[in-house]
Image (cartoon, rainbow, N blue to C red):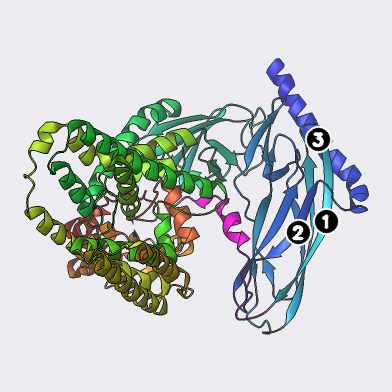
Amino acid sequence: MSRFLRRVGRLCAAGLVALAVLWLSPLAAQAKPTNIAASLVVEGPVQPGQTVTLAIHMRPKPGWHGYWLNPGDAGLGMSLDWTLPKGFAAGEPQYPVPDTLLISGLMNHVYKGDYAVLVPLKVPSDAKAGSTVPITLDAQWLACTDEVCVPEQGRMTTRLHIAADGKRDPRFDQWRARLPAPLASPARFALAGKTLRLAVPLPASLALDDPHLFVARDRAIDYATPQSFSRNGDTLVVELRRPATVPASPETIEGVLRLGPSGLGLAFTALPGEVPPAGAPLNKAASTMLPLLLAGALLGGLLLNLMPCVFPILSLKAMSLVRAGEGEAQARREGLAYTAGVVAACLALGGLLLALRAAGEEIGWAFQLQEPLVVAGLLLLTVALTANFLGLFELALPGLSGDHGARGAFATGLLAAFVATPCTGPFMAAAMGAALLLPQLPALMLFAALGLGLALPFLALALVPALRRLLPKPGAWMVAFRRWMALPMGLTALVLLWLTSRIGGERFAFFAGFAVILFVAVLAWLGSAQRKGKSTKHHAIAAVAAFLASILVLPSPSPPSDQIESILAAQPFSEARLAAARASRKPVFVWMTADWCITCKVNERTAIEREATAAAFRKAGVVVLRGDWTRRDPEITRFLTAHGAAGVPYYLWYPEVRGLPQQLPQVLTTSMLVDLAQPTGN
């Protein structure tokens, strides 16, 4: 009886809110809204025949909230009435992922802070360049606190300037970051009495923390009843209670799956179909998955030591432990200090990544390498290391030169961690993807585990005397070894110089190369003074000044090119192209890469860009979509995050339009791709 009365109370509350809106609407029309300010913003630029995005920017006062398109048990969604010039057409509004608000047994789907509803606007091809057209929107919405609701409305106007170019509003990147990413494969649903069961294709490696499923269809579920989530392989099984008054069976169910408190979500469409049995409860699966993710981060960090920009630093640091007179206590101090530096750097990068994502930035692991100035700084740093290894100059470079104390080891750890983060290697991909979705504490634990794995070889040498005894005895060979270590570091510098052209354009790379020449000249001048026994204080200051000046005087990077050079006839990745390719019922190969990713380049050279792969793909009619993440791309970032990936390389294979995508390993072979394209693999 109490449950029945509670349901009746919900319906009555919703009815009272609706009556209040109708009754107060004339009064609301006489005054400007004061609790949720609204404005209409144009992304720009506006070009004939193209689609421009408008934003309805809503700014609630502290303590007030607005509503999602389906407000839940109480509240009202926003209504929009457009006044557009002839030929212009507004599309469906795109809402950000909402929050839940449970008050007195009523579940509401709300926004408590600033938010923006994005609306695509189609511009006719005959729009006259240079003209200005007015856009008017009459909107109504409900503004509420936890105790009171006030209906509000407003007329928003803006003017579109039709032009081939123009400035773009940077706020749209943050607003798009809050939109749910479209689920690549359709979900399935089945009705079982009073229960609605859904099967959402989701990688088992994708960590979920306090998820919630929002259904767009009104009264399709009992909003306030607890939702049941379980794992069955790569399928998330969701069981929802239907309301007492069961509506007609729907043909499709659309909604948003919120992945956790981070605000990330997936937009899905569910079709009728078979739903597998419930598997491991989500809370139990999450508790057992964290140790596996930590182990993956540890192993992934260990493998990063093999990168050509890290191996020389690790090797020379290890050689420093065999010098004459090294005591056990000193070795332990250096090992622990080096580990502390590596872990501190990984925590700092991870914490900055989480903070920027929380602020609305669409970035992933190795985000710093998507910035041209950071790459230019790394270029100069690797050039300095190469010159130091070759003996061009002597600098008390921590752990690599004259400074062998704990402070030097700590700084070496910072350096090694920073230059080791371009790629997500085997084992660490799932861990770094989970770190973007988990709460802060377990996420930071994963970054710390990554750092511990990276520091583990040197830490083991420092703490285990038996391992140190396996190293060669000190001698003249150490000087030659140091010179040889300049080779991989120099090759890294050449790769970074090439990368500056890819990420910043040819002009940017030219000036970066010129800056390298000047910087090397300053370092040679410093080395000459050192060999003559002169004071080098002013020379060192000049070297640091040259480093900073080289970064500051670089020109602005040019925008990246959309052209793809590939024997696979690849197209640039976009969600629209992926949807169109899947609708064509052809196999689809999604290929996410970046020029700074070593693993990506190896895969492309040895497996992807091969004539055997191209021939097999042509025969099977495979559609290849290549996502270039060298520069920051919000759409690619959303796609990677939605699939539980923090970075590249990342590969997906879609055998058919209704088939579930198969995530491929991060290390590919030609035979693997050829076999996928065979008819038996479909």
Which quarter of the figure has residue 390?
A: bottom left
Identity of the amino acid at label 2?
Ser
Q: Secondary structure at mark 3?
A: helix
Q: Secondary structure at mark 2?
A: strand
Q: Nearer the viewer, residue 84 or 171?
A: 171
Q: Which mark is residue 209?
A: none
Residue 187 in percent (x, y) is at 46, 44
Which quarter of the figure has residue 201?
A: top left
Identify the residue position indicated by label 3 in the image: 15
Which quarter of the figure has residue 200?
A: top left
Identify the residue position indicated by label 2 in the image: 39
Specify few, some or many for label 2: CA neighbours under 10 Å numbering under 14, 14-19, or 20 or more: some
Residue 439 in percent (x, y) is at 49, 35
Which segment did they paint magenta? 162-183
Identity of the amino acid at label 3?
Gly
Q: Which mark is residue 154?
A: 1
Q: Please identify the quadrant where the C terminus is shown.
A: bottom left
Decide whether residue 208 is among the magenta residues.
no
Specify few, some or many for label 3: CA neighbours under 10 Å numbering under 14, 14-19, or 20 or more: some
Question: Which residue occupies 83% across, 52% down?
Answer: 153
Q: Earlier in the sequence, mark 1 or mark 2?
A: 2
